[in-house]
Amino acid sequence: MKRKWPLPKLTIYGQITVTIVLCLIVVIVASARLERWVQEDYGVTNLEALSNRITMMASVLARASPSERKVIVEVANRAGWGLSVTPIALADRFDNSSPNEAYIERLTDWLSPPDSGPLPYGGWKTFLDGRRVVSAKIGETDLLLLERLPEAFVRSDALAFGSNYLVALVTLIITMSVFAIWTITRPLRRIAAVAMRVDISSGPTVFPEHGSVEIVALARALNAMQNRILGMIQARTTMLRGISHDLRTPLTRLRLRADRVGESDVKDALLADIERIDRLLGESLNYLRDSQQVEEPERVDLASVIKTICDEFHDTGHDMSYSGPDRFILKVRPLAMTRAITNLCENGAKFGTQVKVSMSVGSDFVTIDVADNGPGIPEQHRHRVTEPFYKVDAARSGADPGFGLGLSIVAEIVQTHQGRLELLDRRPTGLLARVKLPTQ
């Protein structure tokens, strides 16, 4: 069996180093090929080569007689060189700039001045009557002048400079973008998406532990934090269950003793208090148990669920109605979502005489409104009523205020579905509880 060698885990620093080395290799190979391809296909002017040829020809003409010079120049011009032998005094008309020079040529000369080959007489940038020329000295009295240069050209040295930087820029942009997306951005977005969906029921390990060393360390730290939170919740639940078990026995004894009380008013008051304590223990344990229940999302006809809840309340004598689509499929946790909507309807029926439930479907969200005509909730309390055991007795004095867990359960269920719970004013009076759930 062929043995597979595991690849070493690299840090982000190591991956950046490897990426830069690969970029350099690509730049060296690709820029050389690009320069050779452009030179072969477009015949780019090589200023250094021209200066070298003019200098060599000038040295030959310096050793030739006047008649031989004439013949050599004529033969060269038949090949399209555009050479002429002029007095050296013509150099007084040379200039280092020209109004006809294109901006790209000025930029090229500034960024990539020639650095090889013999220096022409007058310098690399020499203009005569607005045209660029290349010249070389013949002896002490004459100049060999090359005037037939292209109107506009890209020199080979500038091409090498430009191709290197162009390939380097494109290579670095592409490779570093891909590196950032696959090594940094994509794993962090994946962790952020998991963090948005995570809850206590997700289990101890929810963040994927793969990627670079730093990403794996971050995922492990988040998983360890999830384990600690889960352990704290389980310890709290175990403690409250123990307290509940210990309180059930004395509550039973108190109920039996209250039954033997002779005065009916005192007896009824004692039994009512005992019943309230028992309900408080039961709802507290249900709240903690439900927060740790594991329920897989399913495709559910949400409209049918809401209509069923409204019908059940209507059958028990409450004025509750539904308006909205007859059918809408959404992937939710069915039991949890049923309990959330039931809690909102029960809250409205408890504090109002009329409840209207409506649902509207948008492109990104489905909105469920539960509106009652009760006293409502003062604005200064709305940000706290979703906290467990928080009650607004002043606003809810007309009915049994409960234990302050109904809206807390709704808020947690909506949050696990990546939705939002909003508590708004209903005109002229009442509360509008709005649940917005993402459709995707």
Image (spheres, rainbow, N blue to C red):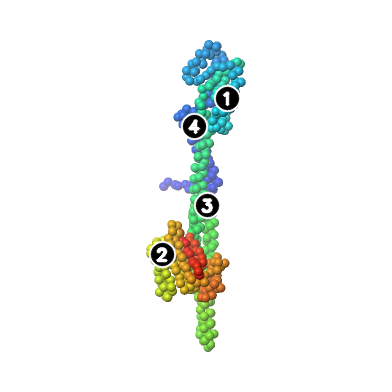
Of the image marks 3 and 1, the number of the one nearer the N terminus: 1
Q: Position of residue 333 (x, y in %)?
A: 44, 64
How many marks on residues?
Answer: 4
Instruction: Say the numbered circle drawn on residue 35.
Output: 4
Task: Tell me the residue that label 2 is attached to.
Answer: 324
CA separation in Å, label 1 and label 2: 83 Å
Of the image marks 1 and 2, the number of the one nearer the N terminus: 1
Nearer to us in this view, 347 or 43 = 347
- Asked which quadrant contains residue 355, the reply is bottom left
Task: Tell me the residue that label 1 is attached to.
Answer: 126
At a point 40% along the width and 69% down the height, the residue shown is: 308
Tag 4 near tag 1, CB within 8 Å: no
Three-letter amino acid code at disc 4?
Glu
Q: Tell me the SS state at disc 4.
A: helix
CA separation in Å, label 3 and label 1: 59 Å
CA separation in Å, label 4 and label 2: 68 Å
- The residue lying furthest to the bottom in this view is 262
In the image, residue 208 above or below residue 340: above
Task: Tell me the residue that label 3 is attached to.
Answer: 215
Give the foreground label among 3 and 1. 1
Q: Position of residue 408 (x, y in %)?
A: 51, 67
In the image, residue 26 above or below residue 286: above
